[in-house]
Amino acid sequence: MGKKKVLIGMSGGVDSTAAAVLLLEAGYEAVGCTLHLYPGEAGREGGCCSLEDVEDARSAARRLGMDFYVFNFSLPFRQQVMDAFVAGYQAGRTPNPCIQCNRHVKFDALLRRADELGIDYIATGHYARTAWDEGAGRWQLLRGLDGRKDQSYVLYPLSQRLLGRLLLPLGGYGKAEVRALAEERGLRCAHKPDSQDICFVPDGDYPAFLQRYGGVDLIPGDFVDTQGRVLGRHRGLPCYTTGQRRGLGVSADRPLYVLRKDTASNTVVLGDEAELYSRTVWAEDFHWVSLPPQDGPLAVTAKTRYSQAEAEGVLYPEAEGGARVVFSQPQRAVTAGQSLVCYLGDAVAGGGTICRAE
């Protein structure tokens, strides 16, 4: 019986390259690929999809003796991720395009190409783990062992079909171990900086991108307090997000924070930091991962942002594929468009897109 084959998504960075090394050393026949998602604009390169990154990935695959492909998925990326990003901001939300990419484009694209090439598995350099739960008859998505690098939060949309074909070689490693492994193998990406920005907004200027790509007009309006009193003028709703304090340009005798955005009145509501806290968070399109859909309350830990610590709460399934979590302690700056992800121990119970909080 021949070696099992795996198609690994490579970005040219240290994580995906180290994952390829580990797969090869584990006896897999590994094939590398880069998904060309964002072609960039004149004078602008995407943060994780640039031509330089493609060449870094190609070079790493060549050094490791792997076949390498570049697959163009720029059209579904534009439709499912970039257009959705624009629509989210127009609706007054702050979307997470990396989760949308994982949900709609990246992993489905890898699996589709693996099937076309007759390849058994797909793999990425994410810091998370999978395991088969015999009792539940389901694949579990588990947090990475290094809590500081755990990326299970951004993988919650993955289906059982995908989890059953997915290998995550870095789930048991920390970042320092991965860089050391790459250095020991003489890989030039060993100390390449991690990509921090959204690939299609590499300069971090979201309002400018929304204007340039989405044709979004930044319509000035009023800053108001919770009683509706006008406090000043804002530059346009997309320029602000929940919890923001800096750059408001409002004079007050105390610090003011963005509490919410009202698209109907084109106002940004400001208030004290104490008003940023919410105990109940609602999510739509809730996707059950390590558990089958539940019909009653469940004690979980949960978080509403990738970088946030988890907090205890109770998860309640709701109608039409929604869910809510009532936290034991109020959570700060819960933002519509971000993701509510719930855990049972190390396992991702499920997650969804935040639609409101109070």
Image: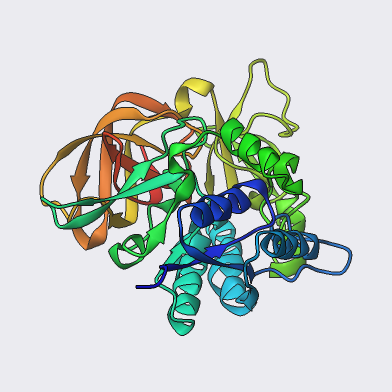
Q: From where the camera sits, is residue 207 visible?
A: yes
Q: Quadrant of the C terminus?
A: top left
Give x and y (percent) for residue 15. 60, 47
Q: Quadrant of the N terminus?
A: bottom left
Rendered image coloring scheme: rainbow
Is 128 in front, or is 296?
A: 128
Q: Residue at x 11, y 51 (%)?
A: 295
| 156 sits left or right of 350 in the view | right
Give x and y (percent) for residue 299. 19, 34
Give x and y (percent) for residue 27. 46, 58
| 304 sits left or right of 41 in the view | left
Q: Residue furthest top?
A: 253
Total numbered labels: 0
Instruction: Determine whether 67 is above or below 18 in the image.
Output: below
Instruction: Determine whether 301 is above or below 57 in the image.
Output: above
| 209 sits left or right of 333 in the view | right
Q: Residue at x 59, y 71 (%)?
A: 77
Is 71 in front, or is 261?
A: 71
Q: From where the camera sits, is residue 204 visible?
A: no
Q: Residue furthest right?
A: 43
